[in-house]
Amino acid sequence: MAVNLLPPKPSDLNSVAGVELGFAEAGIRKANRRDLMLMRLAPGTRVAGVFTRNAFAAAPVQLCRRHLLAGDDIRALLVNAGNANCGTGERGLQAAMATCEAAAALLECEPRQVLPFSTGVILEHLPVERIVAALPRCAESLGAAHWGEAAGAIMTTDTVPKAASCRACVAGRTITVTGMAKGVGMLQPDMATMLAFIATDACVGTAALRALVREVADRSFNRVTVDGDTSTNDSFVLMATGAAGGAAVEAGTPAYTALREALLKVAVALAQAIARDGEGATKFITVEVEQAASEAEALAVARRIANSPLVKTAFFASDPNLGRLLMAIGNAGVDGLDTSGVSLWLGGVQVIERGGRAAAYREEDGARVMQPAEIALRVRLGRGGASTAVWTCDFSYDYVKINAEYRT
């Protein structure tokens, strides 16, 4: 059950001029569920992406990289759920390319102008014929207002579709940003999330868009973790149709900063939704680390806490087992950490002071602040001025059950 997360209302999702979305039931893994999504982009749309650093990058990830290197004149995105098309060798690449060719024929563009994405079970061959057969239904359903339905078509073990939207003023023009994401397990991105797609009607220069996709990923999707595992299929794509008009946004300008903040608003909402819907999650946890020597150091400590199975199970049980928190901080690899300078708060309750149990701390207070569905944990290292935050969830009995039964 997702933690304080409801499906997005259609009225909350703004259409992006130049973007249409369609969906279909292809029966890729399970019958009677949407598992195929097609996104058509208007000519002139600029596209940039970042992808998994896992050495076993899936066939569609490899193909996406090639197509983006060939040019940013992308006309379509094609996403299937139920099958990751990973560990499938040359046959997998041919399968991904065949789906691009089929989509291109329908949309009257070149196969290299289609970006393919897959998510689901690894080491199984993609049922290309089912995707090709369902593609005409995707094309027939294309519509600008279908963000919510499309988000539902890319889910695997997600329980709630994830989409978000906002409007902002950039260089005197009102622009729209809308996006969707999926991913609730095998998730600690090292670039983005499992799958995330954000579009804007702002006009953005190619170099600026490539910088934005990395900055946005780093400050949103790279700050969420469910279990510490980086998927083979992680992909984040940013699209700018330019339909809002005006001069192209370039790096180092006030317009760039305004656009980045709008993109971050949507990306952070999606990243947090992923943590809220973590497999079997009962609690949404924000881990803040401050007074670190560098942001990288703060991130290392935050991730070590957020990924510790012992810490995560303690949160599930509302058990203020302080030793687990100290253990995680101490294992983060901070060179020369003076533990006497470390303090920690659960909610508004200080539990660790100068590296030891806070004098005023009472275990009943710790148990009380670990009961709510949303919990904030704050660590102060006392080493500098850098800080960061990571979003995660607890480990419940259902996490084991969901993953034990993933292929059944």
Image (spheres, rainbow, N blue to C red):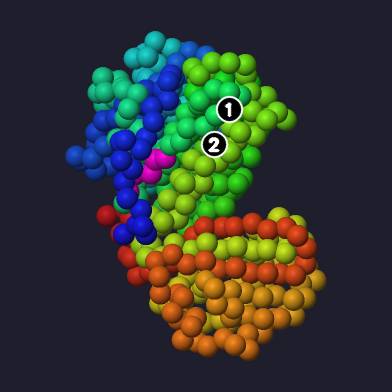
Amino acid at circle 1 = Val
Residue 106: mark in rendering? none
Residue 170: mark in rendering? 1
Q: How many marks?
A: 2
The answer, for residue 16, to whether it is visible in the render is yes
| Residues at discs 2 and 1 in contact (Cβ within 8 Å) | yes
Residue at 61% x, 45% y is 218
Q: Which SS does the magenta portion mostly show?
A: strand
Residue at the farthest right position:
336
Residue at 62% x, 74% y is 344
Q: CA distance from mark 2 to mark 1?
A: 9 Å
Q: Nearer the viewer, mark 2 or mark 1?
A: 1
Give x and y (percent) for residue 380.
68, 69
Give x and y (percent) for residue 86.
45, 41
Q: Is residue 90 above or below residue 249?
A: below
Give x and y (percent) for residue 353.
67, 81
Give x and y (percent) for residue 131.
31, 29
The answer, for residue 66, to whether it is visible in the render is no
Residue at 46% x, 36% y is 166
Pick whichever, 209 or 387, lies toward us. Answer: 387
In magenta stretch: residue 308: no
For numbered disc 1, what is the local secondary structure?
Answer: strand
Direction from residue 199 to residue 295 in the image, left or right: right
Residue 262: mark in rendering? 2
Amino acid at circle 2 = Ala
The local crowd at label 2, few if under 14, some if 14 to 19, many if 20 or more residues have their Cα within 10 Å, is: many
Report which quarter residue 323 is drawn in: bottom right
Give the magenta range. Answer: 160-164
